[in-house]
Amino acid sequence: MFKFFVPKNTVFFNLFNQSATNNVRMAELLYKTVSSETPHDEKMHFNQIARLKSTGNELKHQVYTASSRALVSPFERNDMYALASGINQVCDTIHVAARRLNLYQLKFVEPAMKDIAGLIIEASIELEKGVQNLGNLTLTHDVSTCCKKIRQLETYADQVYNKALSSLIHNETNCIELIKYTEILAALERATDKCEDTTDIIESIIVKNA
């Protein structure tokens, strides 16, 4: 039986939930950035993402501060730090992808970029569900299901990325454009990697506190 998932102080779970929800908003804006029809729209969405990145960083530091001061916490302090950091790394990678899109000013958007951006939204939503359910004794199976779905989404993102990369290598003759496209695709795919990495942290917490 999981012995810790109903903490006396809900401040930590509130911070984790806010962080995960912040990532979903960033992922949705990233998709809008990829889908932007004008440089103005792209810049506007990127600026919103940049502001949310600052929010994510602040939430992470709030977890660190609260953990260092708390006499009682829902689980081990190192795991608190790891989960806060894992969620924030998703935030960071979304920001990196958006920043590259904003800087590189692509002539056209590869369909794979939209596909992976859509997968980032799905993975972020599943991560949000998993984090929200982490505090409920009866929902640990649901948490594991969310983690499984994220791994499946990451695998699919890998496949989309590899197919797009192969096509670019064989068809793009402009070396500078090739670098731009490959770096953006890599940044997008890395965001799904970070979602998967965070599920490893969540599942480790569940196992250690069983």
Image (cartoon, helix red, strand yellow):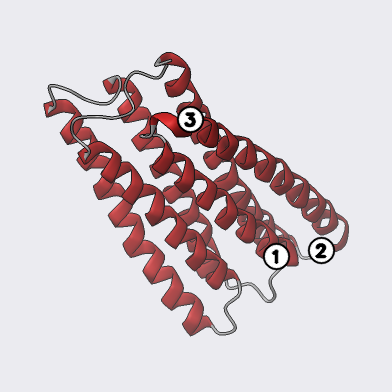
Amino acid marked by disc 3: Thr
Q: Could you tell me residue 175's position as x and y percent?
A: 74, 60
Compared across the picture, whether 71 is left or right of 162 comes to: left
Q: Earlier in the sequence, mark 2 or mark 1?
A: 2
Q: From the viewer's perspective, is residue 129 above or below residue 47?
A: above
Numbered disc in front, either 1 or 3? 3
Quadrant position of residue 9: top left
Which residue in the protein does label 1 denote?
A: 177
Quadrant of the drawing holding the C terminus: top left
Name the residue tied to disc 2.
Answer: 172
Residue 107 image position (x, y, % from top left): 68, 76
Q: Which residue is mark 3?
A: 140
Residue placed most toward the observer, 176 or 10: 10
Can you tell which of label 3 and label 2 is closer to the viewer? 3
Q: Is the residue 130 above or below the residue 124 in the image?
A: above
Mark pair 1, 3: CA separation: 46 Å
Q: Is residue 158 visible?
A: yes
> Mark 2–mark 1 contact, CB under 8 Å?
yes
Label 1 sits on a secondary structure element that is helix
Residue 10 point in image, percent of width and height: 22, 38
Above or below for 170 versus 141: below
Residue 139 as seen in the image, left or right of residue 179:
left
Question: In the image, what residue occupies the spot 32% across and 64% down?
Answer: 51
